[in-house]
Image (cartoon, rainbow, N blue to C red):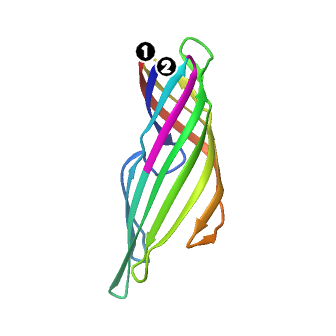
Amino acid sequence: MQLSLNADLPLMSGTPFLGVLHTDRTNNGASSTSWFFGPSLDIFVVPHLSVGLLFTYVKTDATLTAAGISVTGSSSRIQAGARVGYDFALGSQVSLWPRLGLIYEHETDTPALGRDTTGHSFSMNVFAPVLWHPVPHFFLGGGPLFATQMTREYAGQDASKATSYGLQGIIGGYFGG
């Protein structure tokens, strides 16, 4: 059995897998700070077949200042999901590891005035990275990502659903076989 610890790294986004991102906007006095944390774990239960878990936490605090008055708010997103994948060997150091995941997300927005607003969604994603294994027990790669929200409710109402696609990177290592 193999145990893989890995980080999915967005290639087309300013969002890191682990870190803090601060943004200042010109002309409107707005700024925001976001904290990100998103580990994942996959276990190869039989050769080439993996099952995995993922968890993501994002917390954002924002401030808007106009005419000497500052207004602040915050939001948080928690995601938890499971996935299954199969690693196809394409050579001695290259493989293709497509994975299908199902993810639950809970979101909370806290405006400066008023009450918290919450929502939740259920999503499906497909990520198919080509991996390079330059040394044993380490890999990196990238590939296409497709994600779609199958259900979404916000503030007690059905809400618009998002579909995303793009490129994503991955870096990781594994223990065992």
Is residue 30 inside the magenta stretch? no
In contact (CB < 8 Å): disc 2 and disc 1 = yes
Q: Nearer the viewer, residue 131 or 44?
A: 44
Using a 10 Å C-alpha cutoff, classify the residue at mark 2 as few (fewer than 14 neighbours), some (14 to 19) or many (20 or more): some
In the image, residue 53 above or below residue 157: above
Which SS does the magenta portion mostly show? strand
Q: For the point 52% across and 22% down, which residue is it?
A: 45
Q: For the point 42% across and 69% down, which residue is it?
A: 25
**Residue 19, percent from left and from top:** 35, 49
Left or right relative to 31: residue 103? right
Left or right relative to 95: residue 60? left
Residue type pointed to by label 2: His
Q: For the point 63% across and 16% down, which residue is it?
A: 90
**Residue 177, percent from left and from top:** 45, 13
**Residue 133, percent from left and from top:** 49, 19
**Disc 2 to disc 1, C-alpha distance:** 7 Å
Using a 10 Å C-alpha cutoff, classify the residue at mark 1 as few (fewer than 14 neighbours), some (14 to 19) or many (20 or more): few
Label 1 belongs to which residue?
136
Residue type pointed to by label 1: Pro
In the image, residue 108 above or below residue 174: below
Q: For the point 55% across and 61% down, which residue is it?
A: 120
**Residue 88, percent from left and from top:** 62, 20
Q: Which mark is residue 133?
A: 2
Q: Quadrant of residue 129?
A: top right
Highlighted magenta segment, given as a residue range: 47-56
Q: Give the secondary structure at mark 2.
A: loop
Q: Give the secondary structure at mark 1.
A: loop
